[in-house]
Structure formats: C-alpha cells, structure tokens
Image: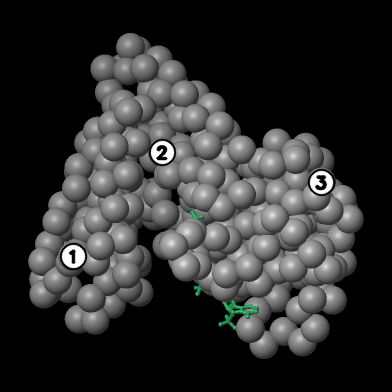
Amino acid sequence: MIIDGKKESAVLREEIKKEIISIKNKTNKIPGLTVILIGDFAPSQIYVRNKEKNSKEVGINSNVIKYSKDVTEEEVLKKIEELNNDKDVSGILVQLPLPDQISKEKIIHSIDPSKDVDGFHPVNVGNLASGYHAIVPCTPLGCLLLLKKIEKNLSGKHAVIIGRSNLNGKPMAQLLLKENCTVVITHSKTKNLKEECSKADILIAAVGVANLVKKDWVKDGSIIIDVGINKHGDKIVGDVSFEEVKNKVKAITPVPGGVGPMTIACLLKNTLECFKARLT
Ligand code: NAP
C-alpha cells in the first residue's frame, strides 16, 4: 500500500478549516500565524510562501515579517517579544536556517512556548519527553498521523528510526514511545545499520541520504515512513529506494507526496491548538 500523504493532508486541512469556521461563528475570532523570514535563502522563501498560502486557505490570519540577511539578533528578539505579547498572534514561527550573526538557540528560547507552533522550545521538548501535553514538531506529528491511518494500535511494535535530529528523529522517538513501541534510534555512527533496520516493524527514515534504505534492509510486511527529501539527478527522492522496497512492505510513504504534505497540515493543526488554548 502506498500511503497517500496528499490525500490525508487534504482531509486534515478540511477538518481544520471547518473547526475554524465554527469557532469564528461563535466568537468572531480566528487564529493568527506570524512567520519571520530572514535573508533570501531560496528554499526558505518557497516554504514560507507555502505556509502562508495553506494558512489562508483554512482561514488562519497569516502574516510574514521579512528581514534582510544582515538584520541584528537584537531586532529579531525585540520583534518576537512584541509578538509574544500580541493577543491576535496564536503562533510564531521563525524560518530556519538563520544567518550566522543570529543564535538559533536564543531565538527558539525567546518564543513564548504556548505560541511555539514548531514545538522547538525546550518547554515543549521537555513536556513531550515527559509524556505531558506538548506542542509537537510538525514533521514527526505528521508521520505519526500517517502511521495511525495504517495501524491504529502501535503498542509493542519494534520501531527503528534512522536519524537523531531535534527536528525529526528525537521527537519521533518520543511519540512512538508514548504509543508503547519499542524504539531504537540509529544515526551515522550506528554499527550494522542494515541489521537494525531489518528488525523494524516500523521504519522511519529521516536522514537526508538518497535511496539509503534498500530492499534487503526492510522486513516483510513492515511500515515505512520516509521523511527524506533529496535531490537525485533531476528528481526528488526519499531516503528509501521506493521502487525496490514498495512490494515487500505493508505500507510506504512516497517522496514526494508522503510526509511533506502532512508537515504543513500539522503546522496548521498546531496553530489551531495554540489559538484554542487562548480562547477562554
Ligand atoms: P539532519 O539534522 O541532517 O539529521 C540527519 C540525521 O541522519 C543525523 O542524526 C545523522 O546522524 C543521520 N545520518 C546521516 N547520514 C547517515 C547515514 N549514512 N546512516 C545513518 N544515519 C545517518 O536532518 P533532518 O533535519 O532530520 O532531515 C532529515 C531529512 O528529512 C532531510 O532529507 C530533510 O530534507 C528531510 N525533511 C523532510 C521534512 C518533510 O516535511 N518531509 C521535514 C524536515 C526534514 P548524526 O547525528 O550522527 O550526524
């Protein structure tokens, strides 16, 4: 089975849109998402444009604040403080990567955790690790939602994650632990990566190496979630050799059209959750 991320994302976005309309009818309020974009890095421009378009489509008031690449850290921190105190702003997102003069750590720490739609603030990271309510990073959240479409009960499954980034691997591990999976996190220093992967009922690949996972790395009947987005010749491919793996497994996400569309839908979901938490 090919997991259709585009379809699942459309379903989720429609649910979000309906809920926003319903809240608006009762309260005359709508969620607001402010994105800070620094510099002219082309992929960031595309991501932010997409976030803005998708936000507007579901009825979120989207606002993009743009700075040139030589803006000072102080100026950005001042703006974040302003946004933290703005009651019309439900969610704040600072598009990464940042130019060298700006500390990613300082920026992430400065965002009010209750408006941290990326789920990167240590308060949200800690709450997720402790099993408490947290704003969860959008990509792993999207992966979990796709997994649950295939298998409602993940309890006892052997899950292997390739990659240990704060963005993907680590929060994914926390989410799967919460689902009672047995979780193994692997990375570039892991010995016998192939052998580790071949034990997985659920394999999450978040690496950034084109077609790393081959047919003989995966278990018959497993579920494969491919987070990777890699340029390969003139194509975009994932971390998994899709064509050779797809007939061996129970379900697999394609690249493109798998995890990517869910990531953006989960950003809208997080924005709505932040908005709802402030409604009372
Ligand atoms: P990252 O921060 O570069 O982390 C990559 C991880 O993979 C690291 O933990 C690294 O190990 C590990 N790794 C690298 N080469 C390896 C190898 N040969 N064998 C085993 N492990 C290896 O990347 P990221 O931000 O998590 O992103 C990963 C991929 O997901 C990228 O392709 C990115 O474009 C994509 N992505 C997709 C979405 C989406 O919406 N679909 C969202 C975000 C990112 P070490 O820790 O030892 O270095």
Distance from Cα at disc 3 to Cα at disc 2: 29 Å
Q: Position of residue 135 (x, y in %)?
A: 49, 50
Q: Which residue position holds label 2?
A: 268
State the residue at coordinates (70%, 36%): 149
Is 99 above or below relative to 153?
below
**Figure quadrant of the C terminus:** top left
Colour theme: one colour
Residue 172, horizontal then vertical, whole percent: 63, 59
Above or below, comparing residue 140 to residue 76 in the picture: above
Instruction: Using the numbered discs, state the Cα–Cα distance from disc 2 to disc 1 in whole angstroms.
Output: 24 Å
Figure check: 165 above or below 134: below
Please identify, in this view, whether the residue under mark 2 or under mark 1 is nearer the observer: 1
Which residue does the image show at 67% across and 57% down from the upper left? 242
Q: Which residue is mark 3?
A: 250
Considering only order in the chain, which callout, 1 or 2, is on the residue closer to the N terminus?
A: 1
Query: Where on the picture, by quarter, is residue 26?
Result: top left
Amino acid tagged 3: Lys
Residue behind mark 1: 40
Tell me the amino acid under the disc marked 1.
Answer: Asp
Secondary structure of residue under mark 3: loop
Image check: 82 left or right of 105? Answer: left
- Observer-nearest of 15 and 179: 15
| Quarter in which the N terminus is drawn | top right
In the image shown, does 193 or 168 lie closer to the viewer?
193
Q: Are marks 2 and 1 in contact (CB under 8 Å)?
A: no
Report whether the residue tagged 1 is closer than 8 Å to ligand 1. Answer: no
